Image: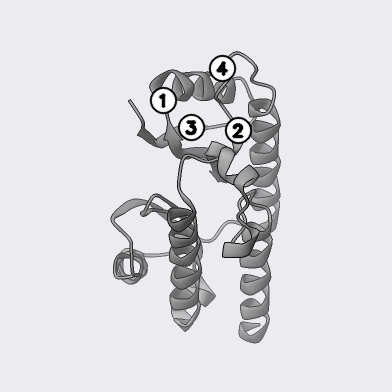
Amino acid sequence: MKKLLLPIALLNFLLITGCTSVATNPEEITEQSLLQERRNRETILMDKGIEAEAYSELSSEEDILNQCHVTITAYNGAALITGESPNEELKKKIISIVQVVPNVKLIHDNLSIANPSDSSSRANDQLITDTIRTALSQIRTMPDFDPAMVKVITENGTVYLMGFVRRDEGAVVINVTKLQPGIKQIITVFEYAD
């Protein structure tokens, strides 16, 4: 079972990072993709590096790998930690590992003390995330808004909204998100441009 978890965790990481709209290679970050972003090329690469390094460090810890479900999302050097840890000791260990990853400026600790979510819960979370992303792509009232500027992360029905937005954009994103089904709670970790 333990040998099976590492490939599953690696596949999960690749699937999660594979679904983002921002390229991870310096050559792949085009002027077009930068138009959809308020971060510069170096910051985008730094955030991807934070996520990759955090996953690498966490996956080298057998107790974390076997007993926890952790998602790391970085934006402008802020690391959002979501998922489940079965006890406070492992939670503290996860936080302490992510805190020392190079370029992490701030930790948003939203790791729950609970058994790891099951595949059905994670599939439901992915459906919620996809529904929200689709709804955000329908926003036409703000000409400078691009839904790629907002990261949507869902854990156990709780939706986390992350990105660098203006206050009016953040308010619209929150209102559109509230209208989507299956959401238990919305937590914003926006960085505001104004």
**Marks 1 and 2 close (CB-CB < 8 Å):** no
Q: Nearer the viewer, mark 3 or mark 1?
A: 1
* Label 1 sits on residue: 166
Please state, as top left, top right, bottom left or bottom right, where the C terminus lies in the image.
Answer: top left
* Amino acid type, callout 2: Pro
Q: State the CA–CA distance, disc 4 to disc 1.
A: 11 Å
Left or right: 81 as drawn, with respect to 140 = left
Please give the label number shown on residue 147: 2
Q: Nearer the viewer, mark 4 or mark 3?
A: 4
* Amino acid type, callout 4: Met
Q: Earlier in the sequence, mark 1 or mark 2?
A: 2
Please give the label number shown on residue 142: 4
**Marks 2 and 4 close (CB-CB < 8 Å):** no
Q: Residue furthest top?
A: 141
* Amino acid type, callout 1: Arg
* Label 3 sits on residue: 185
User: Which quadrant holds residue 178?
Assistant: top right
Q: Is residue 157 in sight in this rendering?
A: no
Q: Is residue 185 above or below residue 151?
A: above
Q: Nearer the viewer, mark 2 or mark 3?
A: 2
Secondary structure found at label 1: loop
Total numbered labels? 4
